[in-house]
Image (spheres, rainbow, N blue to C red):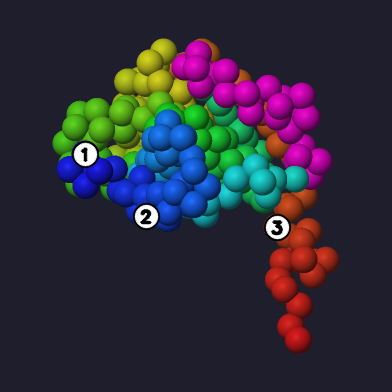
């Protein structure tokens, strides 16, 4: 097992073999149990690796998601959670006011994609700009497109530098009909010309929305509501 690089089965083997002897297991039961442990262990390890590579901001999943608190219609939430749109290489745009659950929802979707064995890459628009400035643009885009789902969060909160605007266009253009992009924004994509040069914004939005599901959130900030009701922190004792 050491030579075959089976660390999970090897770690279990002493205890398992002792149990098998005491309970008179059939040899095939021992072999099956060892292989199951190895497969399960490798699955956990690969999942952890994909999660780390994705670069998720907080680690939130649908386990903590309150579907009733979101202004996204419940049928739409359920349809998006099937992840069929990722399989079809379609895009998702979630736009609306700050604090209405956009980032949480996209991160939970990204975590669900990772759990299916696919790769996710998470960025802010500013991070894209930094990558474009630090590396050759073509190399950066090629690395990002290794992911099956590319998530770009919080567009519209800050002014968009030229490098970031170029990076967004190049990612959207290169991923068009090849990869899925999920994007959150305080602005509807129709207003992206307020953030970046009109020509670049038009070309980006044209490709982004061609095969896209658009969800608009509304209402008061969930974070602010929780803070005002004392749910933002654990009470001091």
- Dot 3 and dot 1 residues touching (CB under 8 Å): no
Question: Which residue was labeled with disc 3?
Answer: 223
Between 167 and 74, the one lying in front of the other is 74
Q: Main secondary structure of the magenta part?
A: helix
Between 92 and 116, the one lying in front of the other is 116
Give the CA distance from mark 3 to mark 1. Answer: 50 Å
Label count reads 3
Give the quarter of the figure containing the C terminus: bottom right
- Of badges 3 and 1, the one in the foreground is 1
Q: Residue at x 37, y 21 (%)?
A: 175
Range of residues picked out in magenta? 67-90
Q: Residue at x 74, y 83 (%)?
A: 236
- Badge 3 crowding class, 10 Å Cα cut-off, few under 14, some 14 to 19, many 20 or more, is some
Q: Is residue 156 left or right of residue 44?
A: right
Is residue 224 at least partly visible in the picture? Answer: yes
Q: Secondary structure at mark 3?
A: helix
Question: Which residue was labeled with disc 1?
Answer: 4
Give the CA distance from mark 3 to mark 2. Answer: 50 Å
- Of badges 3 and 2, the one in the foreground is 2
Does residue 75 show up magenta in the picture?
Answer: yes
Q: Residue at x 62, y 23 (%)?
A: 82
- Badge 2 crowding class, 10 Å Cα cut-off, few under 14, some 14 to 19, many 20 or more, is few
Quadrant of the image occupied by residue 14: bottom left
Image location (x, y in percent) of residue 141? 27, 30
Q: Return the disc, 3 or 1, that comes first in the chain's sequence.
A: 1
- Of badges 1 and 2, the one in the foreground is 2
Question: Which residue was labeled with disc 2?
Answer: 14
Give the CA distance from mark 1 to mark 2. Answer: 17 Å
């Amino acid at each position: 097992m050491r030579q075959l690089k089976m660390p999970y089965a090897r770690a279990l083997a002493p205890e398992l073999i002792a149990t098998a002897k005491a309970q008179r297991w059939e040899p095939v039961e021992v072999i099956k149990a060892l292989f199951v442990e190895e497969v399960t262990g490798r699955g956990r390890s690969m999942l952890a690796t994909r999660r780390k590579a994705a670069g998720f901001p907080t680690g939130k999943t649908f386990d903590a998601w309150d579907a009733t608190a979101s202004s996204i219609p419940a049928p739409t939430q359920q349809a998006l959670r099937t992840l069929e749109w990722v399989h079809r290489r379609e895009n998702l745009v979630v736009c609306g006011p700050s604090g209405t659950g956009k980032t949480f929802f996209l991160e939970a979707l990204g975590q669900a994609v990772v759990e299916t064995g696919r790769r996710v890459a998470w960025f802010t628009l500013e991070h894209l700009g930094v990558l474009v400035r630090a590396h050759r643009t073509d190399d950066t885009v090629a690395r990002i497109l290794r992911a099956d789902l590319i998530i770009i969060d919080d567009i519209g909160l800050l002014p968009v530098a030229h490098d970031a605007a170029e990076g967004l266009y190049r990612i959207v253009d290169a991923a068009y009909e090849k990869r899925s992009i999920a994007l959150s924004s305080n602005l509807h994509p129709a207003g992206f010309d307020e953030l970046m040069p009109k020509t670049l914004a038009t070309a980006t939005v044209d490709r982004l929305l061609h095969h896209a599901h658009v969800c608009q959130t509304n209402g008061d900030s969930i974070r602010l509501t929780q803070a005002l009701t004392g749910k933002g922190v654990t009470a001091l004792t």
